[in-house]
Image (cartoon, rainbow, N blue to C red):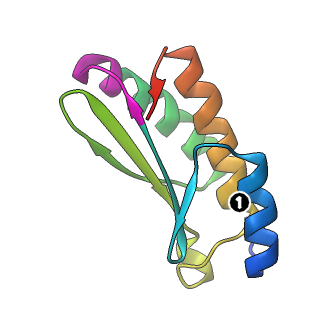
Amino acid sequence: MEGLDILSDCEVAEYLGQRPGWQRVGNEITRSFGIRYRGGVAMIVHVSDVERLIGHHADIDLRWDRIRFTVTTHDAGHRLTEADFDLAERIDRIAAAHDARPL
């Protein structure tokens, strides 16, 4: 998988500046969206199709009216890499396509 170089704190801050709504929590980035349960299930299917194609995945927490994505690179020792921010960008586009509300 591309993007296995671990990002420095400065690089992470720069990438976060390009991904409004995403927050760093330790060695992960996370973002939540408001969406009803059935819409969240459809969004998960859409995200999982993309994840399968790029070989990188998020941890996903689906609740009745919200969904949270948490991303880190497991193959890089649970550290942040460019692959995480690529996936975050893809998740943002998918969320917009599903009319998910940024929280």
At x 69% / y 41%, what residue is drawn?
A: 89
Residue at (33% x, 26% y) in the render: 40
Classify residue 24 by image quadrant: bottom right
At label 1, which amino acid type do we have? Ala
Q: Is residue 93 left or right of residue 7?
A: left
| Magenta-tinted stretch | 33-41
Q: Is residue 37 above or below residue 60?
A: above
Residue 66 sits above or below residue 31 on the image: above
Q: Residues within 10 Å of mark 1 (few under 14, many from 20)?
A: many
**Percent position of residue 82, x then y:** 76, 63
Residue 43 vertical position relative to residue 47 in the rendered view, above or below = above
Q: Name the element at disc 1.
A: helix
The total of numbered circles placed on residues is 1
The residue beneath circle 1 is 83
Q: Give yes or no for residue 22 being in the magenta stretch.
A: no
Q: Is residue 34 magenta?
A: yes
